[in-house]
Each structure stands twice: as structure tokens, then as C-alpha cells.
Amino acid sequence: MTTRRPMIAGNWKMHKTCPEAEDTARALVGQLTGKEEAEIMIAPPATALVPVSRIIGDTPVQLGAQNLFWENQGAYTGEVSGPMLVSAGCRYVIIGHSERRQYFGETDEGVNKKIKAAVAAGLVPVICIGESETERDGGKTFSVLDKQMEKGLEGLSEDQFSQAVMAYEPVWAIGTGRSATPEQAQEVHAHVRQFLEKRFGAQTAGAARILYGGSVKPANTAELMALPDIDGALVGGASLKPETFAEIIHYKR
Ligand code: PGA
């Protein structure tokens, strides 16, 4: 059996000015023992990437961005490219978050281009998928996720996918306080891994980390992380306070 290193990632969304982000990052580093089992990632807003990267420096905390554009440079006002994120200190980039799909018209085709651009730039994509409440109630969860993965991962080689992280985030669980039950989450994660196995083979699927996201908090982290196909958490609201996020990171204690 493949051992997958767990990952706890914090998505700060559109929160925190530069000084606030620096304070949070400093406080988070102060909460760590250096013996954390999980890989830790935080994704501050774009303006705070550089100042936060200076603070987390060579600590175990990795830096991620919340989005990128697929071209490397050019006349694309307001966009930020993969090489720019690398130069700001990023190792990860979240792609296809449901808020980007919902509010900014992000499509599976766009997600696909962004994943390829991220990999080409040497970034690790954290690829978000998830169904809405209506889709779940209509029994369409698996077909929705399959379409997101088919189109999102189209044309990607096993080698290109090998470092990628998947994140299952049911839209109805994001920011609602209503997390998926461990059974619901495990069922979907196992399905995602089966999809990856058909697409990329058993070895790559077995090594791929699949994070759960949607109202993760200190009180529900351990039971989610105990499930065989859940390899980590993508945390929104509960990642904004360093003490709370540190509790999630230390879910085993
Ligand atoms: P939440 O957000 O933890 O606030 O529900 C998760 C996410 O959107 O990544």
C-alpha cells in the first residue's frame, strides 16, 4: 500500500491585508513544533504572497496561490501567471475552486489550461471539484464530478498529473458549517481515486493525495482524516485564525 503524506491546506480567500497576513503567518509558525506529520500549506491573497513567503521562509509551511492565468505573460490585465507565482515563492496553486467557477465564470476547459500551465511552471496544482446541493439531491454527484475530472484533466499525461493534489469540496459544505459526513466524503474520495486509477493507472492513483474541503474545523478533522481515502483537508474559514488552524494541523493530538 502506498503511504501518502497528509496535507493540511489553508485557503484564506479574499481575507487579510499585507500586515494582517504577515501577523497570521508569524503566529502560525509560532504554533508549530517542527515535528508535524502533515505537510502544511497556506494560500494568502495574491498581494500577500511575497511578504508571507519571507515570513514562512524555511519553516515547514509551504506557500500556495489561489488562482493563476494560463499564459506566461502578455496583455492580460489583472492576471497573474505561473512563473510569477513561482517567483513570489509559491509551490502550490489552487485551481478550479467552486467560488471561481460560480462568481468568475471558470469552466472545466479553463481549469484544464490552468492545470497544464501550473505544471509547466513547476507548481503543484490543487485541483478542486465538487457538486452543488441540487446536483447531490438529484443523484448526480458522481456524474458531475466525472465530468469535472474528464474535462479538467483532459490531455494530461501520467507524468504531468503525478504531483497534483485533488480536492473534493462539496459546494453545499463550503462556508456553511455543514460538513459532509465521513461516509459521504469517503464514498466520493474512493470514487475519485477509482477515476484516477482508470485514467492514470493504479500506482499514480494510489499515490495521489485527495483532500476534503467544506466546513473542516478542529472538531471534525480527526474523523475525516481517519478515512482511508482522505489524505488531507482544504480549510477556508477555520484557517484564518492561526490557533484554530494549528489545532487542525495537530488533529492527531
Ligand atoms: P470552508 O471553505 O472551510 O470555509 O467551508 C473551504 C474552501 O472553500 O476551501
Image (cartoon, rainbow, N blue to C red):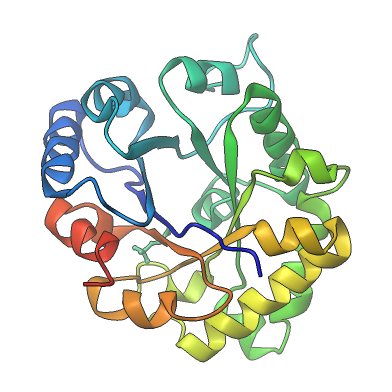
Task: Tell me where residue 152 appears, x and y as whole percent.
Answer: 76, 50
Would you say 216 lies left or right of 85 here?
left
Task: Tell me where residue 176 appears, x and y as whole percent.
Answer: 35, 74
Q: Is residue 163 above or below residue 149?
A: above
* Residue positioned 49% across, 57% down in the render: 5
Task: In this rendered view, identify the residue nearer to me: 87 or 97.
Answer: 87
Task: Tell me where residue 95 appears, x and y as whole percent.
Answer: 58, 44
* Residue positioned 54% across, 52% down in the render: 97
Quarter in which the C terminus is drawn: bottom left
Would you say 234 lies left or right of 122 here?
left
* Residue positioned 42% across, 74% down in the render: 225
User: Looking at the rendering, which quadrant does residue 228 occupy?
Assistant: bottom right
Would you say 171 lies left or right of 234 here?
right
Q: Is residue 95 above or below residue 70?
A: below
User: Looking at the rendering, which quadrant does residue 88 occupy?
Assistant: top left
Quarter in which the N terminus is drawn: bottom right
Q: Is residue 156 above or below residue 135?
A: above
